[in-house]
Amino acid sequence: MSTEVLRRRPRRSARTKAQPVVALVLVAVLVGLPMWLVVVTAGKPQGEALTPNLDLPSQWQLLDNVREVWTRGRIPSGFFGSVLVMVPSVLGVLLLGSMGAWILARRSKRRYAVLYAAAISGIVLPPAVVTVVLLLRQLGLAGTAIGMIGVYMGIYMSTVIFFVTGFIRTIPLELEEAARVDGARPLTVFVRVILPLLRPVLATATILICLYVWNDVFYAFFVLGGRLDTLPLNLFQVASAGLYLNNWHLIFTYVVLMSLPLLIVFVVAQRKIISGITSGAVK
């Protein structure tokens, strides 16, 4: 029996040592190669970028491409529009979604189970874009930032409720009862007791929703209709209009500029984000 264990140990140790290497290779292939393709193509002149490849440019002209895209692609107005839509959408859906999830998690009656099922149905049921656009036109919100914020909040409310409801059910009910005994009202209990404990799950939801909203072009195209600039919408409109036809170096430069803001935010706040996510494991 001991000899079999000794024979198995080298195999297991070899597998253990090989796992990080395999993981690094997969990350380099699946993430590194696309990023390298985007960066090197953004730094090439037009002639070398007609057929995007992994080769280095003969002469880097990334700054020249950035200057041209900055003006012709309306980067400042697109950045302002994206922030104007994303920040209220994320904050609103996290706040309202977590409040609704708290109520659904603490109610055990059958009608609340039906409400929960209806609330998370948006995860699998796509929104009716035509109906949404017609409704916004009737309300006078089509082509406005408020209308776009409402659409994003409606789309991602189900995601927040799904994540937060399951997390709240792991929080001991005695914490809320102790706060109520001290005279705290329901809103005070939520803000001072429940909301601080939701940081791990809200951090995860924030990352997902920020990525979805920042890179969205489908819903923005139908709801905004070009009346408000956003970075993905500007890229789509400029490329489809033929301005950057076969100008892959400018298109990839736009992609780099569009990705930088969120990348910088995640790099600066990565410790807080990771600590918020991992703190749920030791709650």
Image (cartoon, rainbow, N blue to C red):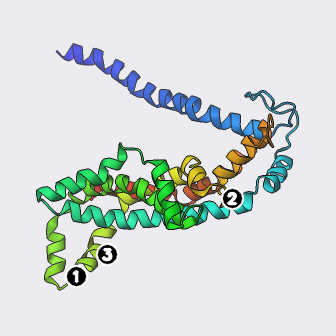
Residue 7 appearing in the image: yes
Q: Residue at x 32, y 56 (%)?
A: 161
For label 2, the SS is: helix
Residue holding disc 2: 78
Name the side, left or right, on which 188 lies relative to 200.
left
Percent position of residue 218, x then y: 56, 46
Neighbourhood count class around disc 1 (C-alpha, 10 Å): few under 14, some 14–19, many 20 upward: few
Image quadrant holding the C terminus, namely bottom left
Residue holding disc 3: 191
Residues tagged 3 and 1 counted as in contact (Cβ below 8 A) = no
Neighbourhood count class around disc 3 (C-alpha, 10 Å): few under 14, some 14–19, many 20 upward: few
Query: Which one is nearer the viewer's eye here, 9 or 132?
Result: 132
Picture quadrant where residue 83 is located: bottom right
Picture quadrant where residue 53 is located: top right
Residue holding disc 1: 185
For marks 3 and 1, the one nearer the N-term is 1
Percent position of residue 249, x then y: 79, 39
Percent position of residue 101, x then y: 27, 61
In the rendered image, the vertical position of residue 168 relative to residue 33, given as above or below? below
Residue 281 appearing in the image: no
For marks 3 and 2, the one nearer the N-term is 2
Residues tagged 2 and 1 counted as in contact (Cβ below 8 A) = no
Query: Which one is nearer the viewer's eye here, 198 or 281?
Result: 198
For label 3, the SS is: helix
Percent position of residue 15, x then y: 39, 23
Name the side, left or right, on which 92 lies relative to 69.
left
In the rendered image, the vertical position of residue 147 relative to residue 158, given as above or below? below
Q: Amino acid at mark 3?
A: Val
Q: Residue at x 48, y 26 (%)?
A: 22
Q: Residue at x 41, y 54 (%)?
A: 156
Q: Residue furthest bottom?
A: 183
